[in-house]
Amino acid sequence: MEKILEFVRNVIVKKIKSTDICVDATCGRGNDTLFLSKLAKKVYAFDIQKEAIDYSKELLKDYHNIEFINDSHENILNYVNEDINVAMFNLGYLPKGDKKITTKSASTISSIDKTIKKLAHNGIVSVVCYPGHPEGYIESKELLEYLRGINQKEYDIVRYDFINQINHPPFALIIERIK
């Protein structure tokens, strides 16, 4: 059985084309940005932490299809004018970083709302949620509540998780624009 991140990447690999415009809404250490940049025409990589952007720029210095943006993903419309084919959100906090700096439900929901409206037909947004820490629990709960209200005639949304794991394990959400 696929682990959460493996599941997300396998969904994306089946959908993405070399001409696609992608967003890594939570750049972090650059792993998702690297994944997307190998497959897509262009990647917009967001992070609010300069440390994350600097680390990712160094990791990805040989890739020239990435625009790094040291700003909140909530401000996506200030930077991305094209239709988006694939967007990835890996919520929580920066690995090996300050665990007090986390994604927050209000800005995450605002960003996802803006992103899904910019999706091309059959475009997808992946969201990996980490409800195992206090802010992540609140964010996951509020995000699920928001997504339950999304029009089913315009978007399909699926949740992938392991229901027998303890301590609120991570789970993935895939949102696809169908209309």
Image (spheres, rainbow, N blue to C red):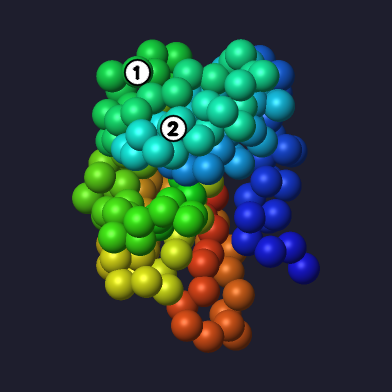
Q: Earlier in the sequence, mark 1 or mark 2?
A: 2
Q: Quadrant of residue 85?
A: top right
Q: Is residue 150 left or right of residue 3?
A: left
- x, y percent for residue 78: 28, 19
Q: How many marks?
A: 2
Q: Secondary structure at mark 1?
A: loop
Q: Residue at x 77, y 68 (%)?
A: 1
Q: Residue furthest right?
A: 1
Mark on residue 79?
A: 1
Q: Are marks 1 and 2 in contact (CB under 8 Å)?
A: no
Q: CA distance from mark 1 to mark 2?
A: 16 Å
Residue type at the position of mark 2: Ile
Determine which residue is flagged by label 2: 53
- x, y percent for residue 175: 50, 46
The answer to whether 18 is drawn above or below residue 92 in the figure is above
- x, y percent for residue 97: 41, 54
The answer to whether 25 is drawn above or below residue 77 in the figure is below
Q: Residue at x 45, y 14 (%)?
A: 82
- x, y percent for residue 154: 44, 39
Q: Residue at x 69, y 64 (%)?
A: 3
The answer to whether 17 is drawn above or below residue 50 in the figure is above
71 vs 23, nearest the viewer: 71
Residue 149 in view here: no
80 vs 102, nearest the viewer: 102
Q: Mark 1 Cα within 10 Å, few/some/many (few <14, many 20+)?
A: few
Q: Quadrant of residue 153?
A: top left
